[in-house]
Structure formats: C-alpha cells, structure tokens
Image (cartoon, helix red, strand yellow):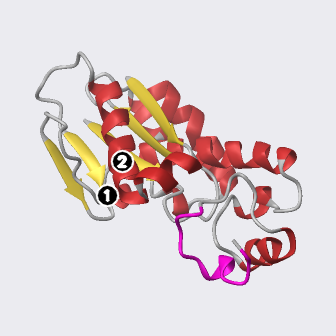
Amino acid sequence: MAGADEAGRGCLAGPLVAAAVLFDYHALTTRELRSLAALNDSKQHTAEAREALYPLVLRSAARVAVVSRCVRGIDARGLHKTNLAALRDAMRAVTDGVPAEVMCLLDGFAVPDFGRPQRAIVDGDATSAAIAAASIVAKVTRDRFMHHADERHPGWEFAEHVGYSTPSHRDAIQREGVSPLHRMSFQSLAYQQLAL
C-alpha cells in the first residue's frame, strides 16, 4: 500500500512539499505496527509528536519519497497544478519498480497521468496509515525547511508560523514587506496594503 500527501498548500510563504510512503504490511513486525498505531493527520499532532513519529515511519516504510516545489514554480504554474504534479512525482518515485497491483492512495486528489491504480480519499490522512505517514513526512520536512528559512530571513518569524497566514505573519508582512519566500500568486488580504 502506498500513500501520498502534501504540506504547505495553504501557506503564504515557503515551498509545497509532497511525500509518498510505501508500506509492505506483510513485512512489518508487530512492534512496528504498534509504533505506527498513533499515525493520524499531521495537523492532529503537536510538532513534538510529529518529530517522534517521523523516524518511526522512515524505519518501518519499505520506501519513502519527498518532492519539493519552490515558491516561484508555484507562482508560475499555479498551486493546484503544482500540487498534483508533486503528488504524482512522489508517488511515482516510491512505486517505481514495485508490482503493478500496489494500491496508491492519495489524500483528497486523484492525480492525472499516473498509470497505476489509485484512489483519492477525502480526509485520507485520518483513515489510511500510508497517507498519514506521508502527511507526517511532508509536514516535518517542510517545517524543518521553514525553521532554517527563519535564520536566513529574519523578521518574518517563519519558525513560529511556518508560512501559514496567522495574525503574526500578516503583521510581519505589513512591517517587513514580502520576502523571497512569499508566494505572490496568492490573492491574500495580507498583501493588499502593500504596493506590490
């Protein structure tokens, strides 16, 4: 079973990160299955819980793939197209060379031009361990990037809000303007007061 999910789709700043995780449930030990029992939508976990689950997923998965799409690519191609392409590329990477009968589960969106059996599941990260695992990998990877971005781009407090549209982020945009990490294709209220 393979699952894919993304992190950062609704952000004002930072990359979109898609991850795919392949589990061979027959090869998992009872201990590994127990360690994965806590898997759920990454948004339902604290940052600390996600960090604790991350290495468990990496140890238990048969394969993991992560795909990142930059801000300028999102602005050039559009968020939805970029999201579908990133999910497709992550799922292709994790299923390359595996038997054709592997079922591919995606959170919310089916991806075009994929060539394998797939199922889009609304709220799949709350019902599928493979999708939930991908959700954890994508979110932890993206959050780590945004924490590093906070050091390179001080003033926007990226470590606090990791690019999401929060009051403190909107205040920072009003105070500092936009950074190279801000998506300019979003028609956000946070940008309306700026002379862009």
Indicate the amino acid at tag 2: Ile
Q: Which residue is mark 1?
A: 124
| Corner quadrant of residue 91 | top left
Task: Using the numbered discs, state the Cα–Cα distance from disc 2 to disc 1 in whole angstroms.
Answer: 6 Å
Residue 93: x %, y % from top left: 35, 26
Residue 38, relative to residue 53: is it above or below?
below
Residue 187 lies in the magenta stretch = yes
Disc 1 crowd, CA 10 A, few/some/many (<14, 14-19, 20+): many
| Corner quadrant of residue 109 | bottom left
Pick the residue in front: 29 or 68: 68
Pick the residue in front: 61 or 34: 61
Indicate the amino acid at tag 1: Gly
Q: Which mark is residue 131?
A: 2
Looking at the rendering, the stretch of residues picked out in magenta corresponds to 184-195
Residue 24 can be seen, yes or no = no
Residue 35: x %, y % from top left: 49, 39
Residue 33, relative to residue 60: is it above or below?
below
Q: Are marks 2 and 1 in contact (CB under 8 Å)?
A: yes
Residue 152 lies in the magenta stretch = no
Residue 27: x %, y % from top left: 31, 22
Residue plotted at (58% across, 32% down): 55
Residue 156: x %, y % from top left: 82, 62
Residue plotted at (61% across, 46% down): 142
Helix, strand or loop for disc 2: helix
Pick the residue in front: 132 or 90: 90
- Figure quadrant of the C terminus: bottom right
